[in-house]
Amino acid sequence: MQKRFFIGFLVVFFLGVWPFPDNDIQAQGRNTEEVEFTVLGNCGMCKDRIEKAAYSVRGVRKAEWSQEEQKLTLAFRSDRTDQETVERTVAKAGHDTENFLTDNETHANLHHCCIYERDPELLRKNKMWNEE
C-alpha cells in the first residue's frame, strides 16, 4: 500500500514540474505574437462565443475579450496562424471585427441579448468574412 502511494506521489510530482512543450513557447524558439483588435459584442454569451471561435484556430494560445473595451487580446503562434484568420473565424461566428464583418443573417440569428448595434464605420470600410 505504501509503495503504491509513493509511486502515485512521484507521478503527480513529476507531472506537475516537468516542462511540457507549450509551457515556454519563447524558450523553444517558436514565434509568438500578441495583438489586440476590436470585436463587437454585448454580454457574457458573446464573450464565450468570441473566445471559443478564437481558440478554435490552430496556434492560438490566449484569447481574452473585454466587454467594456470591445477588444480581443490574442496571443498566437505566428508560424501556425495570423490575425486575419482569427478575425475571419470570429466574424463567421457572428461578431464584427476591425477588418471583417459577419453576414446579416448570422448577426440576426444571435441570441436577442447578443445582437449588438453595428458600427456604421466598420460596415462602410470592412469586407465580409467570406469575401476574398
Image (spheres, grey):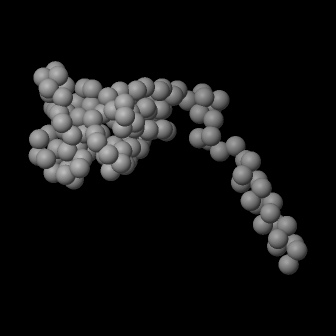
Q: Quadrant of residue 81?
A: top left
Quadrant where the N terminus lies? bottom right
Q: Residue at x 40, y 36 (%)?
A: 66
Where is residue 51 shown, x and y percent of the image?
38, 43
Where is residue 110 shown, x and y percent of the image?
20, 50
Classify residue 127 as left or right of residue 11.
left
> For this rendering, which residue is in front, 19 or 68?
68
Whether residue 126 appears in this view of the structure is no
Whether residue 41 appears in this view of the structure is yes
Q: Residue at x 74, y 59 (%)?
A: 12
Classify residue 119 as left or right of residue 33.
left
Classify residue 101 as left or right of residue 80.
left
Where is residue 76 shown, x and y percent of the image?
46, 33
What is the count of numbered marks? Answer: 0
Where is residue 9 shown, x and y percent of the image?
80, 63
Q: Residue at x 32, y 45 (%)?
A: 43
Quadrant where the C terminus lies? top left
> For this rendering, which residue is in front, 116 or 32?
116
> For this rendering, which residue is in front, 102 or 130?
102
Q: Residue at x 88, y 74 (%)?
A: 2
Residue lying at the far bottom of the rendered structure: 1
Classify residue 73 as left or right of residue 1.
left
